[in-house]
Image: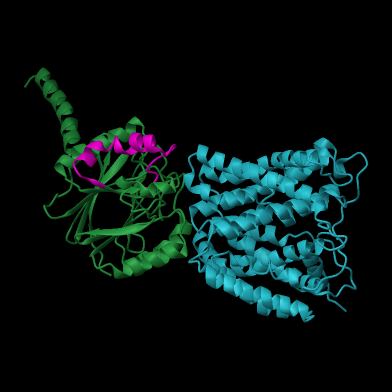
Chain colours: A cyan, B green
Amino acid sequence: MMSRHKQIALRISGFVVDYLLALPIGCVAALVWANTFPDSYYRFAHAIAFAVNDVGMVFFLALITKEVAEATVSGGALHPWRRAALPVAAAFGGVVVSIVCYLAFTHNVGEHMLEGGWVAAGAIDIPGSYVIARMIFGRHPAVPFLLLVSISADAIGLACVALIHPVGDAHPFIGLGLMAVALGSAAGLRRGGVKNFWLYLVGPGTLSWFALFLGGVHPALALVPIVPFFPHGRRDRGLFVEPAPQAHDTMTLFERWWRLPVEAVLFLFGLVNAGVPFHGLEIGFWAIPIAALARPIGIVVAAAGAIAAGLHLPARVGWRELLVVGCTASIGLVFALFFAAAVMPLGPLQLQMKMGALVTIAGGGLAFAAARLLRVGRFARKPTETVRFR
Amino acid sequence: MDRKCVTRILTTLFLIIPAWWGVTAQEVALPSAPNSVKFAAIGDAGTGNPEQYDIANQMTRFHAKFPFDRVIMLGDNIYGGQGESDLFKKFSKPYKALLDIGVKFYASLGNHDDPVNNRYPLWNMGGQMYYTYSTKNVRFFALDSNQVDQKELAWLENALKNAQEEWKICYFHHPLYSDGRTHGSSVDVRVSFEPLFVTYGVNVVFAGHDHIYERLTPQKGIYYFVEGAGGQLRKGDIKRSAMTAKAFDQDQSFMLVEIDGNVLTFQAISRAGTTVDSGTIQRQVR
């Protein structure tokens, strides 16, 4: 018989995992710590930043990649690829408008040193925007549409980080050689019918990490090229939808094993990256929130262009829903923090960017306000569905 | 002595004493020894406003009595536009008299500077964001406090370790310690730089960012100065604390520094030319 305390602990941990609260809890803890005992906080954060940002985040990005890889099979949001064309176009529009606004703002206020951090301007927080979208829409086609927009925008950002922002002293040829071996061995495991995900992680995954690290690319992307080699089910139940209980393919087992550790990683990620002082920040920290505010415009305009070119919005997603999706996509939190840490070395500039990333959490309120104003989702006269996560 | 005579004498004294104090306060309080290292320090200067020009004129005036051969720039050297016309209006024009007599400027960059200006020849940065140079028994380290990566820290450790000079002076934009109300101490930069400063015996550190003048009590054996009022000013921004040794936030200011043997003498001077702080520092032996 389970003790009462254990039951309570399990219920709390289940709530934290279901509502993706580990990251916000980490952020709040970091803010409190950094503003009360800054010396000890920064010593701690600097000491474990590499372990969390460059190693731990490998598994968070791997879980996101797993969702994308599964979405390409039958029944998935990316199958056939034409289904993803409109959200990809919308994401592109959102990213471009965000970056333009970011650069215009930093230039206008004379914060020239921040101009190098433009990659973070287009970031969309996938877990955060998902939670808010589910709270507004429930189970509605607007949610996978938003996820595709978020994933596409962050994929553009990750590509920019990989290609434009070298890490350390780059040895591209060594990196390329190691990556070829990593991909070759992953393909070999797949062809050999290996289903144990640990073998993919220990062999090709480790090689890929070193390939990126030595090649000057952010090593948190290490499992992005490896996860697609994992054997997976023939049908996808949808983006971020709980796998069927009887599913035992490698991707599903990988997700089941890593879901809790990744929550711990996200807590540490928040703890390490969100500690910014409340005082002393320059006006430049508004650059990311302003870019995020402009993002809905980019998303709606680009979607309008794509529709004019012959693409279609998903069923039950109209202009009002699209605008609310755009507002929800203005949350940058975890990915904006990740990009800020990836492209800007430690120091006051990075702190400004991180504060900006934290402020974008207000995008959730913006999305709720827009939904209420436009009578969308739970605010519609006939709500689409009650709000329930899993 | 009648009452009228007493009144005249008192009036004369009333006029003479402040005038005498004003003249002596504008005097150089430094020994100006023939073979000493002499330099000036300005921070947050590049506004292009009349106050920056006033400071530049005072620097020129003081140069006549204290012929410093270099100026260390503590960042935010140019505000706003960063083009050629801005570099002219906010740098080469105000300091023209000093540049013409061969005074060299060695810059570090602040958050308002454009990083590409590290190639501006008159700032002698050699295209680097951090660099070192020496003269006589003093080695200077101009650092980048905007973004402190492992590469810079490794470079700094190596440069400090190899420095043979008696005095090690570091300067950069964000102060490790400051009582400025607006910004204050940059603790995140401090945890990166300070352990190296302490380990390798840095003597004095200059920074800007807070638009005030402040001298702090030694922190872990190192003397810290904030001089971020070379053009900008935040009146009443100082929030005094136990680490404030002397602070001034009522006018723009600059610093003159002389190092002769084991003694460093400093003088902080306001836009009006009055001395707001001065003193000597004996070289710490560690």
Count of numbered circles in the view: 0
Q: From this viewpoint, is residue B208 visible?
A: no
Query: Where on the picture, by quarter, is residue A304?
Result: top right
| A251 versus A354 height, above or below | below
**Residue, far left:** B1
Residue A111 shown in magenta: no
Of the pair B25 and A78, the residue shown nearer to us:
A78
What residue is at 41 percent from the left and 49 percent from the top?
Answer: B179
Q: Which residues fall within the magenta stretch?
A: B75-104
Determine whether, in the image, residue B86 is placed left or right of residue A217: left
Residue B95 shown in magenta: yes
| A154 versus A294 height, above or below | below
User: x and y percent of residue A86 in the render?
Assistant: 78, 47
**Residue, far top:** B4
Give the quarter of the figure containing the N terminus of chain B: top left
User: x and y percent of residue B263 in the render?
Assistant: 19, 58
What residue is at 20 percent from the left and 48 percent from the top?
Answer: B69
